[in-house]
Amino acid sequence: MSGHATYQPKNAFMQWMERRLPIAGLVYSSFIVYPTPRNLNYWWTFGGILAFMLGVQIITGIVLAMHYTPHVDFAFNSVEQIMRDVNYGWLLRYLHANGASMFFLAAYVHMFRGMYYGSYKDPREVLWILGVILLLLMIMTGFMGYVLPWGQMSFWAATVITNLFSAIPMVGESIVTWLWGGYSVGNPTLNRFYSLHYLLPFVIVGVVVLHVWALHMVGQNNPTGVEPKTEKDTVAFTPYATIKDGFLMVVFCILFAWFVFYIPNFLGHPDNYIPANPAVTPTHIVPEWYYLPFYAILRAIPNKLLGVAALGASIVILAFLPWLDTSKVRSARYRPLYRQFFWVFVIVCIGLGWLGSKPPEGNYVLIARIFTVYYFAYFLVILPILGKVEKTKPLPNSITESVLQSGVPIGASAPPPSGARA
Amino acid sequence: MTMTRTVLALAVSLAALAPAALAQDHDTELPPKNRWSFAGPFGKFDQGQLQRGLKVYREVCQVCHGLKLVAFRTLADPGGPGFTTAQAAAIAAEYQVPGEPDDQGEIKPRPARLADYFPTPWPNEQAARARYNAVPPDLSVMAKARGFERGFPRWVCDMFTQYQEHGVDYLTALLRGYEDKPPAGVTLPPGNFYNKYFPGHAIAMPPPLSDKRVDYTDGAPTTVEQYAKDVSAFLMWAAEPHLEARKRIGLQVFLFLIVLAGLLYFTKKKVWHAVELHPDELKPRKPTEYPKA
């Protein structure tokens, strides 16, 4: 069923190739016979979905880049040209713009899954940290991509975000000037953002390779958090994981298509259809939805420098999660207290997202502060203490045992299998 | 369930804080929803409406507003107002655009051709400001460049009901939202007009429409309401000329994906069935007997 059968090609050419560049053998051992825990649920399919979305973004992005003009005088109109005159240009652009949202949605689900089942714990710390690096790269890439259409929100998002660096004491102003390539957001800024927006996805591809490599070193976690012990605990990647990933990928595409074809501007801001105008500031400058929780944390803190520090810390702190969570038990299934704090954490993150879209005044600021405190307390106080005091439920001896216990109850009211009667 | 209790407690405390927070949001009446032929998954533009809307644009809006991203050729494109190429060329020929330099290097105006774009009625922003006391925005993507927040939970429902017509509904409301006198206690800056849907209510654009201002030849009512709807629909097409193709292809993609998902689901079930663990596997299994031929 599984096991590490080595790749032995029958075809003469493939044998010749395998002795020189064993790439087919690599694919065979990584994506065909690779043993995956048999009890993986659908939350485990988001890694594959993310790889697919990265592909979609790169392919649509490369074609869009063939038609786009990175110049302050032409960028907005070149995007409109794509929408109007390029064959299926509207489709490419809507796929790319909504694809970014879907990419982040899948990444957040993927991360929450990792947190719920303790996938970051020994020996998967490096795998998790590579994931945090991927998130950082995605945030940078997405931000620079949002600037390219050169609408009002593009321009003002670029202004607000780059200005955050001015909070750094002593060198802040110089850094901002250096980032801009001038004394305000202008053509040099747009040019370099375009260049980096094209470069970073390939850096992401590189880190994804490391991420998958690290995954294949340590193996996948699973809903029980108990490592596979026997061959019975695992199934081969192909066909079992591939068909399951494939099915959910298509379901995810249905959601994606809903946005692209029916509500393509739902997740965008109308102001970004107004050409950038440095003389007019929009009433509310809001980032894309996937940055809203971080934006809320930034604005919850009255001091600019501390706000920027909190914004950075809210992402960087994730990298330390493997050591902040002191519990030996991985899966939240066997951690009744952790499970509560986790779901509150999820609600707090969504709540911060909602607050990020609201003006920073009155009760919004108050709630944002409470949520920000919880966000950091979750990592710095709750997880370290919880691991020491929580009474966890008994773990199953193996994945197989847990599957059998949760599935058909043995000897219970279920009718005895026909084989046993004979 | 302690978890449910914690979540509930948090939700209740949030709910207590939220109304006060939400009260800060609305001071302007929300634009009413209209019925649009192009709404929903099977939406298509009403060609008659687009042609009437173009007429309103040409006889009213065009005095101040440009449409510089819309080429005359697109008037004859499928999914648009449905003019023939000859009709589109005739419309283009009514406009003057700067020509190409002649032998002497002089640039003289010439009639527009299909490949040209609707010209902007003023040469530069300074000229516009001198003439109108403001720069009338270009209308090419206006139907997508305006919107309003419908607040929670309506924005969540909009995701499922595919309500995407915030921009056109706003434009329609704006064109009909003028009031002769501002409400008591409101003073307008000189040269401004009161509009109940415009953010801040003081708008520099004078009320553009009045009943019977544009002659319709197809029997549609010549009222401000009808003009406002027609020109808004036309601007929706101008902003999203491939809307019909998008929805048509979307439906095909949807059907394909749903069938594919169904097939994959059953394939997955079949594939996994072979390795499902059964309680009786714990006991030694009898070899399967096949009927002998």
Image (spheres, grey):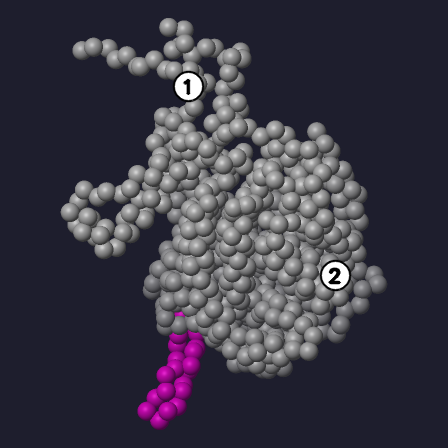
Q: Using residue B193 as the reference point, say whether residue A190 is left or right of it.
A: left
Kindly identify which chain the residue marked by label 1 belongs to: B
Residue that protrudes farthest toward the bottom in the picture: B104
- Mark 1 and 2 residues: CB-CB less than 8 Å, in contact? no
- The residue under the point 56% across, 66% down is A154
Residue B109 among magenta residues: yes
On the image, numbered disc 1 is attached to which residue?
A: B281
Which of the pair B80/A150 is nearer the observer? A150
Q: What is the chain identity of the residue bearing mark 2? A: A
Q: Kindly report the distance in space between the C-alpha atoms of the residues bearing marks 1 and 2.
A: 59 Å
Q: Which residue sits furthest right?
A: B185
**Under tag 2, what secondary structure?**
loop
Residue B188 in sight: yes
Which residue, given by chain and number where applicable, does mark 2 sit on?
A: A301
Residue B256, horizontal then vertical, whole percent: 37, 40
Q: Amino acid at mark 2?
A: Ile
Give the extent of the magenta segment. B91-112
Query: What's the residue at 52%, 81% (across, down)?
Result: B123
Query: Up-down: is B257 above or below B27?
Result: above
Say which quadrant the N terminus of chain A sits in.
top left
Q: Position of residue A220 (x, y in %)?
A: 47, 41
**Amino acid of disc 1:** Glu
Instruction: Please tell me how many numbered marks the rendered image carries.
Output: 2
- Is A79 one of the magenta-colored residues? no
Q: Position of residue A130 (x, y in %)?
A: 51, 55
**Element carrying mark 1:** helix
Q: Is residue B33 visible?
A: no
What quarter of the picture does the C terminus of chain A occupy? top left
Residue at the spot 75% in from the left edge and 44% down from the top edge: B14
Q: Is residue B163 left or right of residue A244?
A: right
| Nearest to viewer (mark 1 / mark 2) | 1
